[in-house]
Amino acid sequence: MDVDDPLLVDDPAAFLAAHRGTDWAFRSRRGLEVLRYDQVWRFLTDRRLVPDVADLLAINGLGETAPGATGLSGMLSVHGRDHARLRGAAAAWFAPARVEEWRPFIRETCRELLGNPAPGTVIDLVTALCVPLPGLVFTKMVGAPAADAARLCAWSDSLLKVFLQDPAHRDEIIEAGQGLEAYVLSLLEERRANPGDDLLSAMLGRHEAGALTDEELIGVAAELLSASTDNTASQLGVTLMHTLADPARWQQLSAEPALAAGAAVEAERLTPRVGYINRKALTDAVIDGLAVPAGTWVRCSVLSGHHDETVFGDPLTFDPGRADQRRSLVFGGGPHYCIGAGLAQVEIEEALLYLTERYPGLRPAGPPGWIQSEVLMSLVSLPVRIPEEIHA
Ligand code: HEM
């Protein structure tokens, strides 16, 4: 597969579809490219393959210990028992029942963020809601001031550029890593002096019990803070974009709130925030009959797997009630499956429910602004007009 073909930049979905039609895997100068849903899932969940953050940092011109690795040196970079220990320090806070408890806070935060705009007003949902919401939820979860949410979003935006694998972003990533590290240190100090019922205080307890070293505590705290905002903001925006695109669909969601969860999963399928997830083979493996030598870099294409026509009928159509829906690949799989997936899902559902219930006549006020690369999809703007009918 020629990954330097300009079509991969101009229209990644079309480029991947053309290849996917002929086979499920291709060798490229990057390693192995896996394009179909079933195989993407098998590669993501095979324990002989692991996410390889160290290589990712090296590609970006960042040594593992360079400033800037903070936020990228937590649980995603370790495996086996160490991974279980690090993940265990935070896992209880992301258990499904615990995550459900956030629904009222999320709903209330949506209300506060949007306020009471007058009918006819045009607002941009990305800046008014999608970007600030995840940061406000997460600052609350770690016991940080709400005023810090905007800084967190900016650091997250810069740090996630590591996945673009372009050394041009090196300085920006380093600067964000340094800012985040200093912030995490001061936050930990503050929580140590004033412990509370929050995630960071709980992690400090694990650290004091000897389950985490100083470095691990800082790494995991920074990782959680940087991972919690940007991905959720774009995935939420895309869910709103697809549901708003058809007034009948928006109206239907207003009448049937139970459809919100399906709409969120379908938006993840059609327009996943994360376009691919990397793996590296630790040992020689044979997967689905294909030899994968130790050290092979594998790009598991979420974007391509989600459009796989052998699994999804009419894959480029947004259909919240689709009968052939499958588990989303956007949160990865296996031991490193996104710890915040449930929280992100609840945030997206609650924001969608708030908007459809309060504004059943909400309509786009212009085309959305979004950037689709092979790696990341980013929603930039989503203008809407506030309707006459506003529910309490
Ligand atoms: C729509 C929003 C989100 C998306 C698309 C997303 C996506 C991902 C992906 C693709 C991975 C790598 C999984 C793998 O390699 O198999 C991951 C890991 C991770 N995510 Fe998320 N994420 C989102 C939201 C969140 C949130 C809200 C948090 C925290 C509150 C979070 C924290 C993490 C952490 C800590 C990891 C590393 C897990 C591990 O290594 O065990 N993510 N996420």
Image (tube, helix red, strand yellow):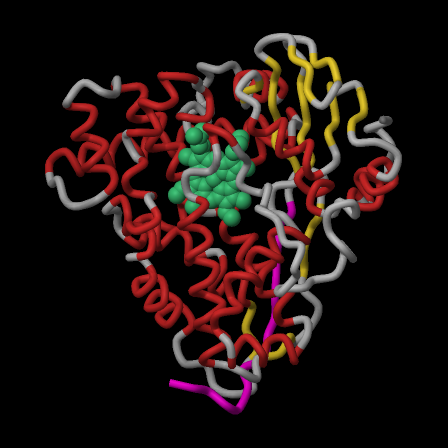
Q: Nearer the viewer, residue 377 or 174?
A: 377
Image quadrant containing the N terminus: top right
Q: Is residue 117 left or right of residue 59?
A: left
Tell me residue 119's x, y (percent): 51, 88
Q: Nearer the viewer, residue 117 or 130?
A: 130
Q: Is residue 361 left or right of residue 301?
A: left
Tell me residue 66's x, y (percent): 46, 17
Q: Is residue 143 left or right of residue 365?
A: left
Tell me residue 113's x, y (percent): 39, 68
Q: Is residue 262 above or below residue 207?
A: below
Q: Is residue 28 above or below residue 173?
A: above
Q: Which region shows up in magenta?
A: 377-392
Residue drawn where x is 43% and y is 23% of the image = 73
Q: Is residue 136 above or below residue 213?
A: below
Q: Is residue 141 visible?
A: yes
Q: Quadrant of residue 103?
A: bottom left
Residue drawn where x is 61% and y is 14% of the image = 281
Q: Nearer the viewer, residue 119 or 169?
A: 119
Residue drawn where x is 27% and y is 44% of the image = 142
Image quadrant containing the C terminus: bottom left
* Residue 391 counted in the magenta span: yes
Q: Is residue 156 visible?
A: no
Tell me residue 124's x, y (percent): 56, 68
Q: Is residue 159 above or below residue 319?
A: above
